[in-house]
Image (cartoon, grey):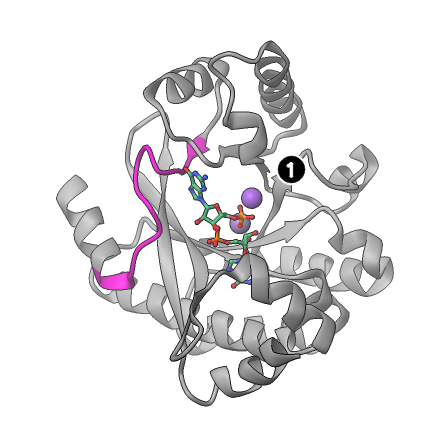
Amino acid sequence: LQLTNALRRALEREQFTLHYQPQFDLATGVVCGAEALLRWQHPELGAISPAEFIPVAEDSGQIVAIGDWVLRNALAQLARWRAQGLTQLTLAVNLSAVQFRHPPLAELIERLLAEHQLPADRLELELTENVAVADARAAAQIMDRMHGQGVRLAVDDFGTGYSSLSQLKRFQIFRLKIDQSFVRDLDHDGNDRAIVSAIVRMAQALGMRTTAEGVETAEQLAYLREQGCDEAQGYHFARPMPAQDFERFVRQRA
Ligand code: G
Ligand code: G
Ligand code: MN
Ligand code: NA
């Protein structure tokens, strides 16, 4: 309850920021995108993790307003980067299943893309596998509309949720993000190696791309590359960082 009340004030008091984690193309080594990750700094409670406050915001419905704020700010940031010449970047935004129960989500995204003159295929929406379970019809409508606009859909934390293979096909998923729980022990867990290998192969067969999350070591990276995983992110490359640091990071790498 304390958290719900604090969340209510967080937006108006401008306590949220976005950090950006670089995503790497494993074939070229180039930074090809960023995942926007929400950060909340409360004056008394300190930094609160989204893992803690997002579920609270989902239960109270506040996630809709917070999610709108994330989309507005992330897309404005992408537009600034493009104006500065960083046109190769895609931007990934996490969406909660609750946001998919609100049809205005699609309108907001279309309006923001138009307002900033952004090509729709520079935006990736990260959904968890549970999105389609919560309210299949509303979610399907929004996902179809987004796909029709050219926006890319990515399944986040892939392998940990409730998705079926028929759903993957039905929703025209562009990318599977291999959950970090399968990447963490890649060096010594044969089952995880088999799972990662199978996900990459299935994605290839279905014409989907793969991104490995939580890559922390050169050994993990080598295995992912060998298996043909397309992209990766994780502390091995870089932590999530403020927009200006991200910009410097990309320029230094180019
Ligand atoms: O960045 P971090 O590891 O603290 O994120 C923890 C969790 O919070 C992750 O599951 C991530 O997907 C989620 N998360 C981060 N930012 C957002 C956001 O803007 N919206 C939603 N819905 N989830 C987010
Ligand atoms: O669920 P989602 O994939 O959106 O969450 C991403 C979360 O993973 C973020 O909170 C981010 O800070 C965290 N993260 C990113 N890279 C790494 C990593 O290499 N190791 C670990 N342990 N966490 C990571
Ligand atoms: Mn994510
Ligand atoms: Na994830």
* 129 shown above or below 16: above
Task: Give the image quarter of residue 216.
Answer: top left
Task: Give the image quarter of residue 2.
Answer: bottom right
Specify whether residue 232 is painted magenta.
yes
Residue drawn at the location 46% of the way across and 75% of the way down:
72
Task: Give the image quarter of residue 78.
Answer: bottom left
Q: Start and end of the magenta stretch?
A: 231-244
Residue drawn at the location 57% of the way across and 71% of the way down:
67
Specify whether residue 80 is painted magenta.
no
Residue 244 horizontal side relative to residue 103, left or right: left
Q: Residue 131: where, in percent of width, then height?
A: 74, 55
Question: Is disc 1 placed on a helix, strand or loop?
Answer: strand
Main secondary-structure element of the magenta-colored stretch:
loop
Q: Is mark 1 within 8 Å of ligand 4?
A: yes
Residue 237 horizontal side relative to residue 3, left or right: left
Q: Residue 63: where, in percent of width, then height?
A: 63, 73
Q: Report if residue 117 is visible in the image.
A: no
Label 1 Cα neighbours within 10 Å, binned few <14 / some 14-19 / many ≥20: many
Residue that numbered label 1 is attached to:
158
**129 and 202: which one is in front?**
129
Residue drawn at the location 58% of the way across and 61% of the way down:
52
Type of the residue with mark 1: Phe
Residue drawn at the location 29% of the way across and 30% of the way down:
29
Outermost residue toward the left?
Answer: 252
